[in-house]
């Protein structure tokens, strides 16, 4: 109270992500209210939060909103405000129009704007300051995703006593692509402020290490990176920073490796056993005119997901006469995403033109070719769709993991259904019993769809059993536990409690 700084409550475990697990929305009376939005990350971290009196730092999803920290359904919420201009430059601009396309193999051309970068630095600093102000001495802080890559370094400078983790949900690109980024060294240094840097795939971790080696010249011995220690920051640390000598230079050892993310597998399976949801699945098939085969795609409407490629393949199968609309319907859920970014507007136009053309050419009065939905649905409806689908079509051109593939598998407790999965999704590293495809190879994509349609039940069951074992054994709770274990091993004494 003797300074003009607000004294915040502090916590031993702090998660930092661009978006909070709550949404600030208007209710039917026009009053502001908070709505819990339970994604996979929340499900995974909620128990850890409770066991450690944790806090969540992030943006509430509305520009120009200043709110004091509060508690929501057992989670301490610490909002970070963003101005409308910052949303445009830091979020829609640098995060979604520079980093997103760059990190997904430049499927769409990244835009580089210096004012976007300046906003990214400024907003990352605000997140770091907010996280520092709510972290107790020696706390564990876990920073999430590409919007916040500078936070680990900024946070370490403010609070050398903290143990810092970072997890990248999207791919990390190869050196030849990453090198385009005008601020590449700053981004690498930003990430290296963490003690543990987690990636989806082993390839992402090695792309990162290679960039560090080539662009910063630091020594790497997989899975470690030795970062030279600036003795000034090391000496102010009340907790000794683990470091050792390397060729006469003091270095801090950073762990960079894969921690493939997953889903709440049991939760999805339970929903799929609900008779009401099973009835809904039958109703969906009837509504489609009971085609012999229902093929399903579920994606945010994003150019990384290969939605056009799968429509092209399906349209050609109809054109070739290898399929008719009575044989097969493609249901495509394309949930609205990043609608103020131009590349996403263009993509939507292209996809909707394609759907219109294919339906115009091949739909009958009783059967549609592509049942297209630019809409978000409740989780129960998604599970009903997964149950209704004979074939799940995941054709991402590049994807960090792809949780939709795992959700489909978790739901299929009948051991039926065929997963067609792009080699370019992180999930392909684990889900080897799927039908793996190169979505750029339209001829082979067509053949794979036909193979899935014609696959005997016995083969479907063998494959689905193997897939289910992977997804049920490796759920999101295991993912967060293994990341946090790696983090607590960095600085013994900085343990965080396992959920009881
Ligand atoms: C990023 C990475 C990585 C979609 N539409 C609806 C809906 N969804 C749900 C899905 C799934 C999630 O959203 C999407 O997750 P994905 O993993 O498929 O893809 P991204 O959104 O791009 O996620 C990705 C992930 O982060 C986690 O690290 O796997 O690679 O790009 O859960 O079911 N859910 C509901 N209605 C919808 O309309 N309820």
Image (cartoon, rainbow, N blue to C red):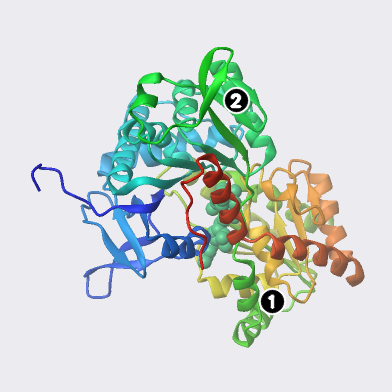
- Looking at the image, which is closer to me, 13 or 205? 13
Q: Where is residue 414 in the image (x, y as percent from the top left)?
A: 77, 77
Badge 1: how crowded within 10 Å, few (<14), some, or many (20+)? few
- Looking at the image, which is closer to me, 44 or 106? 44
277 sits to left or right of 116: right
State the residue at coordinates (10%, 42%). Answer: 3
State the residue at coordinates (50%, 31%). Answer: 242
In which image quadrant can residue 270 be found? bottom right
Real-space CA distance between mark 1 and mark 2, rounded to the nearest whole angstrom: 48 Å
In the depicted structure, whether residue 456 falls above or below residue 87:
below
Q: Position of residue 487 (x, y in %)?
A: 53, 44
Which numbered dot is residue 177?
2
Q: Where is residue 89 in the image (x, y as percent from the top left)?
A: 34, 36
State the residue at coordinates (83%, 45%). Answer: 443
In the depicted structure, whether residue 87 falls above or below residue 61:
above
In which image quadrant can residue 459 be found? bottom right
In this rendering, the label closer to the viewer, 1 or 2: 2
Which numbered dot is residue 366?
1
**Res. 321 in view:** no
Sooner in the amino-acid sequence: mark 1 or mark 2: 2
Instruction: Assign a secondary structure to mark 2.
Output: helix
Task: Report ligand 1 position as a quadrant.
Answer: bottom right
Instruction: Assign a secondary structure to mark 1.
Output: loop
């Amino acid at each position: 109270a003797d300074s003009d700084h607000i004294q915040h409550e502090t916590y031993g475990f702090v998660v930092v992500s661009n978006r909070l697990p709550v949404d600030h929305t208007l209710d039917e009376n026009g009053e502001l209210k908070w709505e819990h939005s339970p994604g996979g990350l929340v499900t995974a971290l909620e128990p850890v939060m409770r066991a450690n009196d944790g806090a969540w730092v992030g943006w509430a999803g509305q520009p120009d909103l200043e709110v004091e920290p509060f508690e929501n359904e057992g989670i301490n919420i610490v909002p970070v405000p963003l101005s409308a201009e910052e949303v445009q430059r830091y979020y829609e601009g640098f995060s979604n129009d520079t980093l997103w396309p760059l990190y997904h193999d430049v499927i769409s051309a990244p835009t580089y704007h210096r004012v976007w970068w300046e906003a990214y630095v400024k907003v990352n600093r605000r997140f770091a300051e907010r996280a520092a102000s709510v972290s107790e001495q020696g706390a564990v802080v876990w920073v999430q995703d590409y919007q916040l890559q500078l936070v680990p370094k900024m946070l370490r400078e403010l609070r050398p006593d903290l143990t810092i983790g970072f997890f990248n949900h999207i791919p990390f690109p190869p050196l030849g692509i990453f090198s385009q980024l005008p601020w590449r060294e700053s981004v690498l240094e930003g990430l290296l402020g963490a003690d543990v840097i987690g990636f989806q795939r082993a390839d992402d971790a090695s792309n990162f290490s290679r960039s560090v080696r080539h662009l910063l010249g630091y020594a790497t011995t997989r899975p470690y990176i030795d970062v030279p220690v600036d003795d000034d920051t090391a000496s102010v640390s009340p907790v000794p920073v683990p470091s050792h000598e390397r060729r006469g230079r003091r270095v801090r050892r950073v762990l960079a490796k894969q921690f493939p993310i997953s889903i709440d597998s049991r939760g999805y399976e339970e929903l799929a056993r609900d008779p009401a949801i099973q009835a809904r699945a039958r109703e969906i098939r009837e509504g489609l005119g009971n085609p012999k085969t229902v093929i399903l795609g579920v994606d945010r409407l994003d150019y990384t997901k290969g939605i056009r490629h799968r429509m092209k393949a399906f349209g050609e199968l109809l054109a070739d006469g290898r399929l008719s609309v009575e044989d097969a319907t493609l249901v495509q859920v394309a949930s609205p995403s990043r609608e103020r970014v131009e590349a996403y507007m263009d993509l939507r136009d292209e996809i909707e033109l394609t759907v219109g053309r294919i339906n115009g050419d091949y739909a009958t009065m009783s059967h549609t070719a592509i049942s297209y939905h630019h809409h978000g649905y409740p989780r129960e409806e998604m599970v009903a769709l997964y149950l209704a689908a004979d074939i799940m079509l995941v054709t991402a051109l590049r994807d960090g993991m792809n949780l939709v593939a795992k959700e489909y598998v978790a739901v299929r407790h009948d051991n039926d259904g065929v997963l067609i999965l792009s080699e370019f999704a992180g999930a392909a590293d684990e889900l080897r019993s799927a039908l793996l495809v190169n979505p750029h190879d339209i001829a082979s994509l067509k053949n794979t769809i036909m193979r899935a349609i014609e696959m005997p039940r016995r083969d479907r069951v063998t494959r689905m059993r193997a897939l289910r074992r992977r997804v049920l054994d490796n759920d999101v709770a295991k993912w967060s536990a293994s990341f946090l274990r790696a983090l607590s091993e960095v600085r013994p004494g900085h343990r965080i409690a396992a959920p009881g």
